[in-house]
Image (cartoon, helix red, strand yellow):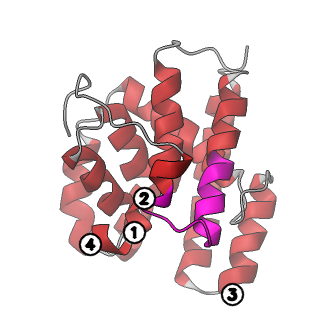
């Protein structure tokens, strides 16, 4: 991962549309995550200089779904590699790479990526972990079309869309205790 002082490229709705089509649900999901992040940032006590970077994390968390960025067929890693390449600061890269329990998913479904994730995980600091928690919190509280939902609704939605027993559904259920812990940690930041 790169240092925290790298020059930042600013993502907004227009920049996002270069990577995810506005005609797809994923684009609207990302905009919903951005909206959740902005709402959350009004309620939590964190350094003010982190706030624009957290909005950028929300905009970029799913950029790895872009087909041209696909190197590993795993959107958190593909998005993080892209972010690193364009000079995005380390906490944002960490948020993209590890959002929504991607590390656990790698451990269970992508043994080919474990070495990469282990190395990156060992470089994380407290700021990175906070960014990961905040983007995960916003992601798990946003539906596929960008609506605000509860964690329970998100879990049920994933199972409904993918079906019981599907790898994605199984990972969502496996990660549910982690998501609940993320909720507790984020709620401790409320003012």
Residue 152 placement (x, y as % from top left): 79, 59
Residue 187 placement (x, y as % from top left): 70, 28
Q: Residues within 10 Å of mark 2 (few under 14, many from 20)?
A: many
Q: Residue furthest front?
A: 14
Give the residue pinned by disc 3.
Answer: 163
Q: Residues within 10 Å of mark 1 (few under 14, many from 20)?
A: some
Comparing 39 with 44, the one in front is: 39
Asked if one can make out residue 61 in the rendered structure from this viewpoint, the answer is no
Give the residue pinned by disc 2.
Answer: 63
> Do the residues under discs 2 and 1 have CB atoms within 8 angstroms?
yes
Span highlighted in magenta in the image: 17-33
Which badge, 3 or 2, comes first in the chain's sequence? Answer: 2
In front: label 4 or label 2: 2
Q: Which mark is residue 72?
A: 4
Which badge, 3 or 4, comes first in the chain's sequence? Answer: 4
- Is 156 within the magenta? no
Residue shown at 65% from the left, 25% from the top = 41
CA–CA distance between discs 1 and 3?
24 Å
Residue shown at 64% from the left, 59% from the top = 29
């Amino acid at each position: 991962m790169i240092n925290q002082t790298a020059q930042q490229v600013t993502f907004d709705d227009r920049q996002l549309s270069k990577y995810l089509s506005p005609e797809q649900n994923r684009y609207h999901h990302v905009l919903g995550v951005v909206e959740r992040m902005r709402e959350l940032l009004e309620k939590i006590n964190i350094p003010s200089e982190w706030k624009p970077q957290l909005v950028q994390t929300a905009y970029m968390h799913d950029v790895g779904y872009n087909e041209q960025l696909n190197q590993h067929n795993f959107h958190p890693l593909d998005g993080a590699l892209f972010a690193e390449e364009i000079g995005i600061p380390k906490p944002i890269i960490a948020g993209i790479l590890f959002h929504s329990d991607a590390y656990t998913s790698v451990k269970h479904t992508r043994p080919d990526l474990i070495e990469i994730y282990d190395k990156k995980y060992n470089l994380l600091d407290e700021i990175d972990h906070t960014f990961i928690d905040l983007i995960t919190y916003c992601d798990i509280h946003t539906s596929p079309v960008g609506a605000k939902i509860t964690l329970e609704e998100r879990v049920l939605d994933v199972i409904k869309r993918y079906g019981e027993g599907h790898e994605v559904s199984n990972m969502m259920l496996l990660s549910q205790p982690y998501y609940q812990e993320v909720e507790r940690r984020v709620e401790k930041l409320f003012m």
